[in-house]
Image: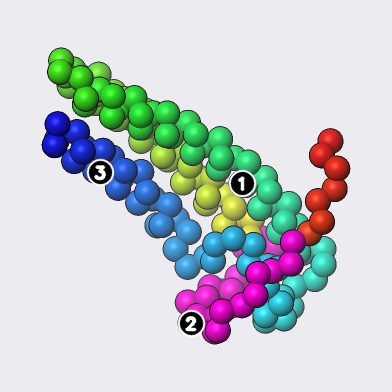
């Protein structure tokens, strides 16, 4: 049974690795709400609205993709836990897992592309530089927009 734990650890590592690679350099969360970022990049209200919309759309896709990926990962783990192991089925399941992981990475990458389109090449690079150098002392939580009624 120690092998099951090892397999779970390995599958978990493979599951998380692409997330770090795709978003490397791009800050997490709603960085466009940070007053220092707004000032540094000269963001306008329409740009902030477009970033917010892109983020919301992206988060919806990511949530769906993560759920699908987790389901495929669970199926693969289940195969390794069985006494009767079918290598061919496990390889096929691994391929399905990889396809879901690629779809998740594609969703993340689409958001990065949208951000670059909104900011343009110079400000996009400024954003990356700003966070690679470290944005300075801890900042207060960015203000949240008031949520309207859910349609």
Looking at the image, residue 83 lies above or below residue 53 = above
Query: What's drawn in magenta, residue-wise?
Result: 116-144
Q: Are marks 1 and 3 in contact (CB under 8 Å)?
A: no
How much space separates mark 1 and mark 2, taking CA atoms? Answer: 26 Å
The relative height of residue 94 versus residue 107 in the rendered view (above or below) is: above
- x and y percentages locating residue 83 in the rendered image: 15, 18
Q: Secondary structure at mark 3?
A: helix
- How busy is the neighbourhood of tag 2: few (under 14 within 10 Å), some, or many (20 plus)? few
Task: Return the disc, 2 or 3, that comes first in the chain's sequence.
Answer: 3
Q: Which residue is mark 2?
A: 133
In the displayed structure image, the side of residue 63 where residue 101 appears, left or right? left
Viewer-closest of 120 and 150: 150
What residue do we see at 82% from left, 63% from top? 46
The residue under label 1 is 59
- Closest to the camera, between mark 2 and mark 3, is 3
Residue position for label 3: 9
Badge 1 marks a residue whose secondary structure is: helix
Q: With respect to residue 108, does 69 lie above or below?
A: above
Q: Which mark is residue 116?
A: none
């Amino acid at each position: 049974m120690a092998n099951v734990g090892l397999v779970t650890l390995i599958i978990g590592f493979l599951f998380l690795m692409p997330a770090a690679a795709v978003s490397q350099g791009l800050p997490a969360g709603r960085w466009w709400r940070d007053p220092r970022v707004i000032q540094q990049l000269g963001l306008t209200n329409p740009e902030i609205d477009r970033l917010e919309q892109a983020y919301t759309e992206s988060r919806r896709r990511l949530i769906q993709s993560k759920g699908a990926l987790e389901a495929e990962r669970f199926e693969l783990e289940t195969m390794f836990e069985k006494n009767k192991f079918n290598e061919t089925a496990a390889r096929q399941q691994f391929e399905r897992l990889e396809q879901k992981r690629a779809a998740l990475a594609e969703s993340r990458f689409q958001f990065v592309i949208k951000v670059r389109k909104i900011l343009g090449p110079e400000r996009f690079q400024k954003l990356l530089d700003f966070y690679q150098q470290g944005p300075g002392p801890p900042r207060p939580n960015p203000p949240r927009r008031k949520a309207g009624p859910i349609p």
